[in-house]
Amino acid sequence: MKINKMHNNPMVNNTFKENERKADPKTTQATKGVDIKISNSAKELVNRINQVEDKGYSEKVEKIRAKVLDGTYKVSPEKIATSILKTIDDEKGIE
């Protein structure tokens, strides 16, 4: 298969010109940075979160993760359902 006059094809020429225009630093605009300001209350919240160390929670999560990876973690639908119903009742104020 022989392709002739590829350099005269307007579609190809336009594509090359467009690529050259995009690469030309005179025609490209510099992207402005965005200023972000974090409120003092947000900074305080982050500091409080970082100060709280709940190692017991982390250990519990790590034990569950290990059981899931080993395939020994068992889910109890009854416990989950009971916990969900208790939470709903607590939110409604039902005892």
Image (cartoon, rainbow, N blue to C red):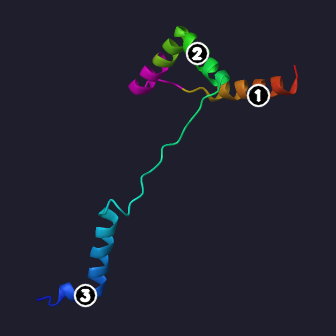
Spatial CA distance of label 3 from label 1 is: 72 Å
Specify start and end residues of the magenta stretch as a single range: 63-74
Measuring 60% from the left and 26% from the top, which residue is drawn there? 76
Residue type at tag 3: Asn
Looking at the image, tell me whether mark 2 or mark 3 is earlier in sequence order.
Answer: 3
Q: Is 74 in front, or is 63?
A: 63
Spatial CA distance of label 2 from label 3 is: 63 Å
Name the front one of labels 2 and 3: 3
Relative image position of residue 23 (x, y in whole percent): 30, 62
Q: Is 9 in front, or is 51?
A: 9
Q: Are marks 2 and 3 in contact (CB under 8 Å)?
A: no
Q: Which mark is residue 9?
A: 3
Measuring 30% from the left and 84% from the top, which residue is drawn there? 11
Q: Is residue 68 left or right of residue 2?
A: right
- Is the magenta region chiefly helix, strand or loop? helix
Relative image position of residue 13 (x, y in whole percent): 27, 81
Q: Is 26 in front, or is 34?
A: 26
Residue 30 in the magenta stretch? The answer is no
Measuring 31% from the left and 80% from the top, which residue is drawn there? 14
Residue 67 in the magenta stretch? The answer is yes
Considering the image in quadrants, where does the N terminus appear?
Answer: bottom left
Residue type at tag 2: Asn
Name the front one of labels 3 and 1: 3
Q: Are marks 1 and 2 in contact (CB under 8 Å)?
A: no
Neighbor class of circle 3 (other Cα within 10 Å; few <14, some 14-19, many 20+) is few
Q: Which mark is residue 38?
A: none
Q: Secondary structure at mark 1?
A: helix
Looking at the image, tell me whether mark 1 or mark 2 is earlier in sequence order.
Answer: 2
Q: Which residue is mark 1?
A: 85
Q: Which residue is mark 2?
A: 47
